[in-house]
Amino acid sequence: EVQLVQSGAEVKKPGESLKISCKGSGYSFTSYWIGWVRQMPGKGLEWMGIIYPGDSDTRYSPSFQGQVTISADKSISTAYLQWSSLKASDTAMYYCARLGSGGIAAAGDYWGQGTLVTVSS
Amino acid sequence: VIWMTQSPSLLSASTGDRVTISCRMSQGISSYLAWYQQKPGKAPELLIYAASTLQSGVPSRFSGSGSGTDFTLTISCLQSEDFATYYCQQYYSFPRTFGQGTKVEIK
C-alpha cells in the first residue's frame, strides 16, 4: 500500500528555521516525483515545487523560489521542505504528494496527511 | 504562467442533482488536467487525471471532459459524501497551478 506519512504539527517563532518531512512507503521512492503544496488558512491549494528523489532534480514555483528548500534523502525514502527564517505568513497546512506514473507530467495520486505549521511570536 | 479560472466558486445543490464545474485555462494544456476533492480537515484526493481518466476507486458518478483550454467535472447524481471543495490543476507546464476551488454545499 502506497503511503506518505508527514511529520507532526509545528509551532515556531518568526525568524526560526524549520524542516518538515514526508516519508514514502509501499512503492519505489526513487522512481516518482514528490511535490509540496501549501494551503493557507481558509484558502486554496498552491503548488510549491517538486523533487525527483532518484537524482534530486528539483523545480520550484516562482512564488516559492528562494523562500523554501526542497530536498530528499533516498536512503530513508524521505522528502523534506525547509525554511531558514520563518515568517508569520508561512502559517499554513503543507501537504506532500506523489506524482503518479507519467513522470514529471503527472497528477498527485497519493497525498500525505498534512503538516500544520504555525508561526507566531 | 498558465492562469486558471474555475467556476462557480460556490455551488448549492441537493442530493441527487447533476452538477457541473468548469475550469478554463489561459492557454492550451492538451489533456494535462486533474480534478481533486477536498473535505474539511483532510488532504486532497485525486478524482480524475488526464482530463477524463477516473482514478482507481473513484465512483463512476464522477466524470471529466475537455481538452485544450476548457474542462468540466460532472457529478451525475450528487451523494451526501460529495459535499466538499473541488479543485482543478494543470500539469502541462511550470509552475503547476490550481484553480481557485468550488465549494459544493447542501442547498
Image (cartoon, helix red, strand yellow):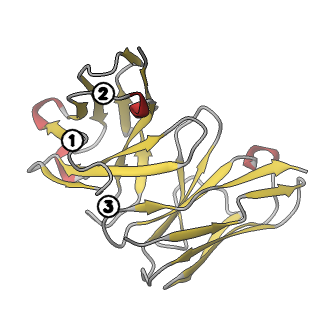
In this view, A32 is above or below B40:
below
Can you tell which quarter of the image residue A4 is in? Answer: top left
Chain hosting mark 3: A
Please, what is the three-letter code of the amino acid marked with disc 2? Leu
Nearer to me, A61 or A13: A13
Task: Name which quarter of the figure residue A12 lies in.
Answer: top left
Q: Which residue is mark 2?
A: A86
Chain ID, mark 1? A
Residue shown at the point (55%, 73%) measured from the top left: B52
Q: Secondary structure at mark 1?
A: strand
| Pick the front one: B24 or B81 | B24
Chain at numbered mark 2: A
* Vertical placement of residue A46 versus A105, above or below: above
Residue B60 x %, y %: 67, 63
Q: Secondary structure at mark 3?
A: loop
- For residue A95, which quarter of the picture? top left
The three-letter code of the residue at mark 3 reads Ser
The picture places residue B7, in percent across and down from the top left corner, at 68, 67
Q: Which residue is mark 3?
A: A101
Q: Are marks 2 and 1 on the same chain?
A: yes
Q: Earlier in the sequence, mark 2 or mark 1?
A: 1
Q: CA distance from mark 1 to mark 3?
A: 21 Å
Tell me which label, 2 or 3, sits earlier in the chain: 2
Q: Which mark is residue B56?
A: none
Contact? badges 2 and 1 (CB < 8 Å) = no
Residue behind mark 1: A70
